[in-house]
Each structure stands twice: as structure tokens, then as C-alpha cells.
Image (cartoon, rainbow, N blue to C red):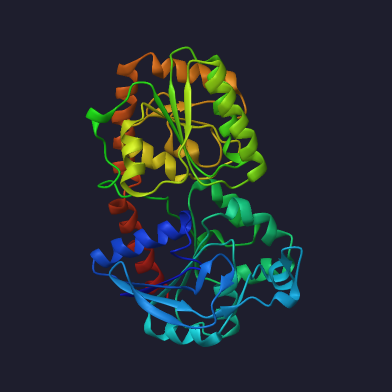
Amino acid sequence: MKVLMVTPSYYPILGGTETYVEQLTQKLNEKGVKADIMTLNMASKWNPVGRDERGKTNGGRLFRMSAHNPRLFNFHNRSIHGELFNVHVIPSMSFVREFDHYDILHFHDDTDFTFPFFSSLALKKSKPRLWHLHTIPYTYRRYERNPLLKSMIRRTADRYIGLSKYTIPFMLKLGLPESKLAILPNAIDTAKFSPNKKMKTDNLILSVGRIIFQKGLDVLLKALFQLEPPAQVAIVGPIGDKLFFSEIQRLIRKVNDTTVHKVSYLGPLRGNALVELYQKAAIFAAPARIDHFPIANLEALACCTPVIATPTGAVPDVIEDRRNGLLVPPDEPTALASALNMLLKDRKLRESYGEKARDTVEKKFSWTVVSEKVMQIYDQLLTMK
């Protein structure tokens, strides 16, 4: 079986979908499925290069396809093609020639319609197509309010994947037949994200994620004013909203100046440095106002770190209240402080939740489990054809 992963962006551009594509491709190649990656040739988001490049990655081939961004049609950081078709750049149509060499085309990322749209125009319909809608709870409105896009999304693929049961109503409202829908959760490398109990720091609270209002980092900082045991708080993540980050900096200074707690912002981290923080943390705090399926929760759970989160999106499918973590209402610092106090004061409870946390990930969200489900979907697609 030969599969082509088709994603608008890839490394050096970093993000959840890019990481997912990288890891899935690697796991499939390890299992003997020939998996390659096709992406737009961009060094930064929506700034393409006008030439094709070829290389290797994760045991497969990497195609970086040429494209251009017609600035003439851009206005106030928007474009006609982006508004009408959710297409951010215009690719060279040479990319469709590569499709002939694969049994399955696996499209990723519904924030951009470039590859599905232009491949449909090329009328190459013979290959089974799978479209992985990683962010459909957020992109749904864009497709739903545009009759052209709503019509095209229904004709783009033979099967559609959502990350959780939470995504099913969004897909059905777009007119996608229930018979074409599949659920495939996010996954992580459980060998990389693994516990080290000797490293646990009893008072370390960790937060990982983009610094934007929706993630609720300010709620965590406000909760610290009601937290009793002295705590260290480590914040990791890229700045997604500069104005909101200014408010976060103000709150950090206030906590550090007026309480016994100490907060540090460490910027974006990857690799071993991030894994070690998960291993050291006593608690992982994710008080999001809005979220769907944050991978950071899985990374914490895999390191035996209990998670305190809010019941948004598919989070309750991962965080089982009072089993592997705690669920608190969004935007309520007092409720979050109460949950933090409970776990900080009870090491045995933290350890109990941590053991169940690791068990949850191994049984449901490891790449071993999820890659097998991917292969089952591939087999079904080939049988359909």
C-alpha cells in the first residue's frame, strides 16, 4: 500500500497538524506502509516559494510543491481567493502528477482548501481520497456560510475523519453522509512521553499551549491568588496574541510580587526539554475557555501527570473526572484554585490519578493503537473502490 499525506504546511512550520502528519508518516513506514508527504514549499505560513523541491523525511519522500501568493488580490491581510474558496495560495498544477503513484490520497488540515480544491479541478478522481478535518469545530462556520465551499467539501473525499464524537454534528451539518464519517483521535509517542517518577516536583504546576485568550492562561494566574500551598508555575508556549500576552505578563508580575508563588514563562519548547517538564510537573493545568482536542493533555497524561482541565470539546473523552484528573468549569478561577489545592495537598491522590493517566493513553491514544485504526480505514477505502 502506498499513501500520500497531503498537507498545506509542514516543517519548518510548526503546529499540531504538522506534528501529527510527521508522526503518522513515521509510524506507517515502520509498519511497512509506504507513506510520503506532499506540502506547499513555504518557509513561513502562506509565503510560498516558486519552485518544486524533493527530499526525504520519516522513512519516506517529501515533496515541496511550488506556489505563489497573488498579492494583487490581497486586502487588509485577506484575499479574494481566501475569502471565496478558503485557498491561501495558488499552487502549480504540476503537483497532481505525483498522485498517480499512490493508492490513497490522505488530505490533512481543513483550515486551508488549497490542495483538495485544485486537485478536484484537475479531475483526477480515480484515487481513494481521505480528508482529515483536524479543526472542523473552528472552521465549520467558514464552510457552512459559503454555499460553494459547502458543496465542494461534500465532493472532495470518499471518507472524512474527525478527531472525536464531538466533531460528528459539525460534519453532518455540512451535509457529509454519516456513512462516510470516521473518528480517529489524536495520538502521541508513548516511548518519548513517558514517566520518570524520580523527577516529580511536588509543587510544580505546568501549563503548555499557545498564549491566546481561548486557552485561559489568565484564569490559572488568577487562581494562584487563592492557592494555599506555595507553588512553582512553569508556562510554555508560543505567543499567539501580543495584546493578551501583555496582560499575562502583568499578572505574572503581580503573582510574583504579592504571593508566595513563583511563575516563569519559558517560551516555546520542544524535544527533551518539554518532556522533562511534563515528567517533573505535579499537575498539568489546562483551563481553556474553548478547545477541541489538545495534544498537550495527552502528553501530560503519558508522563503520569494528572490534568486539571475544562469540559470543552472532546476534553471529557480524555480527562475522566476524579480518575485521571479533574474537570472544572471554564473561566472560574475559584473552582480551579480548589482543584489545585486538592491535588497539591494530596500526593497519593496525584499518584493514583497519574497511574490511571498513563493507562488511559496507552489504551486509547498511543500511536500503536491509532496507527492500526488508520490502516483499517485505508483498507476500507480500498475495498470501497
Query: Whole-percent x and y of residue 183?
Result: 45, 53
Q: Is residue 315 or residue 171 the one in the foreground?
A: 315
- Residue shown at 30% from the left, 23% from the top: 352
Note whether 296 is above or below 89 in the view shown. Answer: above
Q: Is residue 114 left or right of residue 128?
A: right
Query: Whole-percent x and y of residue 6?
Result: 46, 71
Q: Is residue 6 left or right of residue 252?
A: left
Q: Could one spot residue 41 in this view of the protein? A: yes
Quarter of the figure that contains the N terminus: bottom left
Note whether 127 is above or below 202 in the view shown. Answer: below
- Residue shown at 45% from the left, 80% from the top: 127
* Total residue callouts: 0
Query: Whole-percent x and y of residue 252?
Result: 56, 28
Query: Whole-percent x and y of residue 38?
Result: 44, 74
Q: Could one spot residue 8 in this view of the protein? A: no
Q: Is residue 65 left or right of residue 371?
A: right
Q: Is residue 305 or residue 139 the one in the foreground?
A: 305
- Residue shown at 54% from the left, 32% from the top: 287
Note whether 262 is above or below 297 in the view shown. Answer: above
